[in-house]
Image (cartoon, helix red, strand yellow):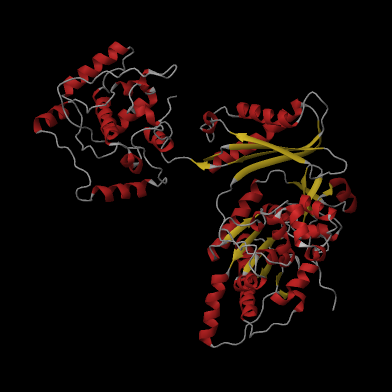
Amino acid sequence: MEPFPPPTEQDEEEEEEDWLRPQPAGGASPCHSKSALARSAAHRVIVHVDLDCFYAQVEMLRNPELRDKPLGVQQKNLVVTSNYEARKLGVQKLMFVKVAKEKCPQLVLVNGEDLTPYREMSYKVTELLGEFCPLVERLGLDENFVDVTEMVEKRVKQLQQSACSRVSVSGHVYNNQAINLDDTRHVRLILGSQIAEELREAVYTRLGLTGCAGVAANKLLAKLASGTFKPNQQTVLLPESRPDLIRSLDRIQKVPGIGSKTAKRLEALGIKNVCDLQAFPSAALEAELGAAVAQRIQKLSYGEDESPVTPWGPPQSFSDEDSFKKCSTEVEVKEKIEELLHNLLDRIRKDGRQPHTVRLTIRQFSSTDKWFNRESRQCPIPPHLIQQFGKESSDILSPLVDILLKLFRKMIDVHLPFHLTLLSICFSNLKALPRGKKGSIGFYLKQMSPPAGSAKRPREVEDVSQEEGNASWNQNYNRTGTTKSRKLPEEKQSQLKEAGIPHCPFHLPPGDIDPQVFGELPEDIHQEMIAEKAEAMASCSSQCPTSALDKQKLEEKTSQQAGIVFPPHVDTKTFYELPADVQEELIAEWKNQGPVSKTVDKPPEKPKASKGRRNAAPCLSQSNSLLRYFKPR
């Protein structure tokens, strides 16, 4: 029998993979015994799906004429990947284009610098796998972990009920290990191999993509096993073969989760392979790397990994980078930043969320450390710029360039010669937009909170859909004794009707305001908002005043004509201090809503001037002013 081939090297160098980092809660404690870890790991069945030459497959799907030709996907002067026709002729990934063309003159090159089609196909694969099992975790664009433990348990019960004693494995068994059907661990993994084959078949049938799969008791081993037989094949790893698989890794950096920097520190200690790491004294390793890192990588060296499969969600960041031979002037840096930003801003606009942090990464030329000499700086994005994300007409590019150049100058002295080979920009800390339309009062109420020190503050609530919010509001409204509506006398109702103002009880929130947020506001603010709603409707046929005296007269005239007196602490002047578009929106919305509160005989009191704030606007005069809940434009 020929020696069993070791797993292939990973496509990308990673310092540490998130799925292998210690879990903040629920993970295994370092002091857990190996037997406890083994029992826990033996129960799980994890499938790692790795798509074959992913970029090349996507290009062949986009252009079927390329399917039978040697194909390479080019980024800058490198062939980042190639199909298997090209690999048979000597083309390897990350090979220089010039060298690849020398080895394979008939090589067809496709520009792969735009990652959009690859991202779109990647999400389709993950969504498809999610139809089979909810526990799917993305790893890069072309890999996914699937925890099929529950599916396996159901099939085990079906086998027991049917009294079937025969079950066949799908694909290869690592090291041709003999299968013991009396061992429940073997049976679970064999059933997992059948599920893995079904997943791969579905991806090929519906999306046209082939891929490899590894089936094992944890994510680390499944990932290592998936690269054993390529392309379009799968391998199941039985527990007895785990030591053989781990020892087949001839370099320490082939262990997923041990990146280049950690590998260098280990090599400095004389640790070159997995066997060296296993034999190295734990105390000495902890002294060099720290207890957490040392314990984690020593567990990896034994194939132990209890990290859970974390279901994928929207991307946690948006990044793009550009590599080149040389960039040595600030003008060139600015141009490359602008190029990267155009693509990133378009992706952020399509996503719909707003980033709150930006990071710039550079790589300086080094003859000794060609790939890993990177440095980064990041900073929060100013609030006034955050609101501009997602707007096609907003001029956000220029201020972002200025911010990134400031970060660049913190790393590079532009007055001295420099030589860059890479620039990368990353937007992170993404937060969803509130469902209210920007510019509406509802938008500001969802975004802002009353200042500290107020007597009663609305608590944070989850942003719910309009249907969910209405249902919640209706449920609260229908509760007996929850809220008392104030009914106007018939005489006053007729006056309101003549003024064109429909009647509604105090507890109904104005439209476009999240009912949950409205319900959490103090009662006096409820009254203020509804009262201002009534005033706005009464004044909608008049032009907005241009002076404080005109405002005062119009307020008194409106109140007298409509027979309206507003509740205490209401600043009617606040409405006229709002931006014009907000005033128009309020009037338009409130025409279709019921106002108002109660009637009185005297006009509203003038707001008191605010004290203790420099350049305070008149509209911030009252402590319960509506403008407390949002910042003026």
Q: Is residue 594 or residue 119 the one in the foreground? A: 594
Is the residue 138 above or below the residue 485 in the image? below
Residue 80 on image: x %, y %: 77, 50
Is the residue 322 above or below the residue 563 in the image? below
Is the residue 275 above or below the residue 447 in the image? below
Location of the N terminus by quadrant is: bottom right
Q: Quadrant of residue 526?
A: top left
* Badge count: 0
Answer whether residue 12 is visible to the viewer in this image. no
Residue 516 on image: x %, y %: 34, 44
Q: Quadrant of residue 421?
A: top right
Residue 530 on image: x %, y %: 26, 32
Is the residue 241 above or below the residue 557 in the image? below
Location of the C terminus by quadrant is: top left
| Residue drawn where x is 87% and y is 53% of the image | 104
Q: Quadrant of residue 285?
A: bottom right
| Residue drawn where x is 67% and y is 78% of the image | 169
Residue 459 on image: x %, y %: 38, 42
257 left or right of 125?
right
| Residue drawn where x is 76% and y is 70% of the image | 245
Q: Is residue 612 or residue 491 the one in the foreground? A: 612
| Residue drawn where x is 78% and y is 27% of the image | 329
341 left or right of 615?
right
Answer whether residue 478 is visible to the viewer in this image. yes
600 left or right of 458?
left
Residue lying furthest left? 491
Residue lying furthest right? 102
Q: Is residue 238 or residue 101 the one in the foreground? A: 238
